[in-house]
Each structure stands twice: as structure tokens, then as C-alpha cells.
Image (spheres, grey):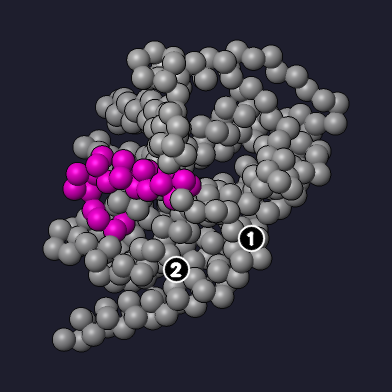
Amino acid sequence: MYCFLSYFFVILMVLISVAFITLLERKILGYVHIRKGPNKVGVIGLFQPFSDAIKLFLKEISFLESYNIYPFLFSPIFGMFLALFLWTLFPSNFVFIDMNYGVLFFLCLSSMGVYSILMAGWASNSKYALLGAYRGVAQTISYEVSFALVVLSLLFFISSFCFDKIFTFQKNMWFIVMFFPLFLIWFSSCLAETNRTPFDLTEGESELVSGFNVEYMSSGFAMIFMAEYANIILMSMITSLLFIGKEILVFWILFFSVVFIWVRGTFPRFRYDKLMYMAWKCYLPLALNFLFVSVSLKSLLLFF
């Protein structure tokens, strides 16, 4: 019972965080563009996220005859479910799952996000949505390879899938210090996994209108939007856990979330061929080499 209430509280905080990180992003991007962000609804715009949510969830839902209606409706729900269910990994006094295989659980469940994108693009029966879904799936699968190899480099070093072992090791030395190039590969792969700038090729407005979610409106669009920002906060948490540990975790989650926003305001969108070139010709060889280095270091430590 206590585990359920604890998880419910975590999910409630995540949903509130999603609301306010959208406001934070609009404020930061406003100042990046030398303009003001939302500042009319409530005090300094604090009620703007709630105004947007009420507007989106109360708008009329219309359907076209060409939709594949059930996959079309199920896709945003599935994406939101995955984004929230992964928060069972949040380190708490009440254990949600067996954390001995927490990293493996994260890798398995996070890889299922491509099904939500593919289902949304296919069920929309729109060429723009389908092209956006193809691009999103290809991008996500490509970067998941480097994504997994980076995690394996850390896991080989501690010889465990357990998050607690990672926390214990990092009390002496953070992985972000030991494997800083790996951290850079990991973080840019997180940007690609969450379809964020400069890797938001699934939403290429100039050629795809809005990508896989172009046919969604009101509540369906809101759920896709919320799942995207819940994933940003989730990846900030996983980055903190893997490379820094769980000390002052809330601060590091906020810090990495702000870095996601800062990157959006700084870097232009990649060209798609350069995106794929970087995944397969740059990150994959680097991640494999670091995996070899990690295994070699671990072998030397065991030998001596």
C-alpha cells in the first residue's frame, strides 16, 4: 500500500513538473530571443500551463473516416504510459521494483517508445505522419545502439545491473569525471532519443508539417506533448543516476532539464544524413572503443 501511494505521489509530482517545465522552457527561449515569455495568465505567467491544459483537454475531438481509429487513439496513451511507468526507477524509501536489474529494466522498456511513434504515424493515414514516423523510428533505433553501449561500459566496470551498486561506487568518484567523453555521447543520444533539438527530425516543420503527430488535435496532442516532456525529465533523472549518483538528485534533474532547453535555444537542426552519419560513423566506433577500455580497466583492477 505504501509503495503504491509513494509511486502515486511521484507520478503526481512528475505531471506538475511537466506543466512547469513547459513554462520554464518558454521563459528561457523568450529571453534567448530577447523577448518575454508567457507573462499574462496569473502572476508572471505561472498559470499558463494550466490554461493550456484546460484548453487542450476541453476542445472538441473530430475524426476523419481515413483514420485507423483504435491504434490512433491508443498510441498517445501507450506513449504516456511508458513515460510514467519508467518512473518506478525513482530511488525512494519505498521500493517499487527489484532494483537488482533496474538498468536492464530501463533499457528494455525505453526501447518500446518507437512503437508509439510508429503506431501514431501509421494510424493517421497521412503521408506526412508516416514519413515522420519512419524518420523517428530510424533515428531512435540508430541512437539506441550507442545508448546501450554507453550503459554497458559503465555496467562492465561495476559488474552489476543494479542502480544501488552504481550509487555506491560513485560515492568515491563520479562516472561523469571518469568517463566524460562517454557522458557527452550519452547526453547527445538522450537528445536524439527524446526527439529534441538539434535532433528533432521527426517534426521537420519545413518538410513534414509536424511529423508523426500532425493529425492529432486537442487531448491526443496534449498526451503526446506531456509524454515528450515527461521523457525529458526522466532522461535527466537517469543521467543523474548513472553519472553522478543520487546525491542532491532534484538539483541535477533540474540542471539537466535546463541543459535540454539551453541546447534547443542554441543549436540549429541537423540535416538527416548528418544525423545518421554521426550515429553510425562517429558514436558507434567511439562507444565500442570505450567499452573495450572499460572491460580492460576492470580486468586490470581484478588482476592486481
Q: Is residue 264 magenta?
A: yes
Report the magenta stretch's main SS.
helix
Q: Residue at x 58, y 49 (%)?
A: 200
Residue on which the image places disc 2: 149
- Location of the N terminus by quadrant is top left
Q: Earlier in the sequence, mark 1 or mark 2?
A: 2
Q: Which label sits on residue 88?
A: none
Q: Examine the rendered structure and indicate whether residue 191 appears above or below residue 26.
A: below
Badge count: 2
**Disc 2, SS:** helix
Question: Crowding at label 1, few (<14), some or many (≥20) Cα neighbours within 10 Å?
Answer: few
Looking at this view, name the residue that lies furthest to the right.
Answer: 65
**Disc 1, SS:** loop
What kind of residue is marked 1? Arg
Question: Crowding at label 2, few (<14), some or many (≥20) Cα neighbours within 10 Å?
Answer: many
Q: Who is closer to the viewer here, 171 or 211?
A: 211
Q: Is residue 38 magenta?
A: no
Q: Which label sits on residue 271?
A: 1
The magenta stretch spans which residues?
A: 242-265
Q: Residue at x 53, y 49 (%)?
A: 197
